Structures are given as C-alpha cells and as structure tokens.
Image (cartoon, rainbow, N blue to C red):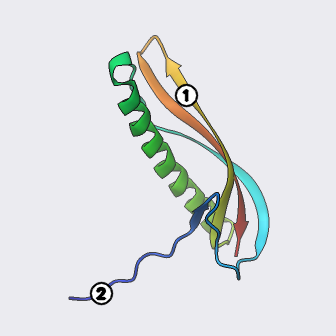
Amino acid sequence: MIATAAPEKIVYWHRELPPLSADVFGEDTVEATSGRVATTLSHRDAAWETCYADLMERTRLRLEQEVARRGGRYAHVRDETIASRSDEAKGESWLYGRFRYTISR
C-alpha cells in the first residue's frame, strides 16, 4: 500500500492561524452562495445545515482559487457575514456569505 501525503492546508478560519513563517501581502473579500433548497417550515433546521455546509465548501474552494490566482499559499478568514436569502415565488431559500481574509505566502 502506497501512503499519500495529505493535501496542504490552504484556508484557515478565524482562530486557526497559518504557519508562523507566512508573510501577509494582502487583504480581500470573497462572496459566495449556497445551493438552493425548498423552503419549508417543517425542515427549516435541516435546510439551514445543508445550505451552511454547502456555502462553506464553496467558499473554501473559492478561497483556494484566489490564493492560487494571486500567487499566495494561505488564506486566513478573519471575518464573515452570512445571511439567508429566499425566492418566495419559487419556494426556495439559500445562504449568502461575505468573507474578509488575508492572503500570505
């Protein structure tokens, strides 16, 4: 059996800190949305959890793309704002997030 190395961590959230050797060279903001789910009062908590997990995964992927695009190695999310959105006509809800981060090499 061949052992494979775990992928290097790129995104650090709030109190998690990138390596001490990292040199911060910028700050920026990304926005992301989760997938849409059917709006029902009976499954509100499950819908929130589904949307939240999806939003965080999409945000992680977006941050990794930004780090690569800007020639960095790490993103450190320092602040986030998450709000629910809905389309009553379609009976759908989703989450919108805005994430402020620093980028370092």
Position of 5 relative to 96 (above/below): below
- Relative horizontal placement of residue 13, taking residue 94 as reference (left or right): right
**Label for residue 84?**
1
Q: Which residue is drawn at 51% across and 21% down?
A: 86
User: Spatial distance from mark 1 to mark 2, Cα to Cα?
Assistant: 42 Å
- Amino acid under disc 1: Ser
Position of 97 relative to 9 (above/below): above
**Label for residue 3?**
2
Q: Which residue is drawn at 45% across and 11% down?
A: 89
Q: Residue 78: in sight, yes or no? A: yes
The image shows a total of numbered marks equal to 2
Q: In which quarter of the image is residue 65?
A: bottom right
Q: Residue at x 79, y 69 (%)?
A: 25
- Amino acid under disc 2: Ala
Q: How crowded is mark 1: few (under 14 residues within 10 Å), some or many (20 or more)?
A: some
- Relative horizontal placement of residue 61, taking residue 39 as reference (left or right): right
In the image, 21 versus 68, the foreground residue is 21
Whole-percent x, y for residue 49 in the image? 41, 38
- Relative horizontal placement of residue 3, taking residue 28 as reference (left or right): left
Whole-percent x, y for residue 79 in the image? 69, 49
Q: Earlier in the sequence, mark 1 or mark 2?
A: 2
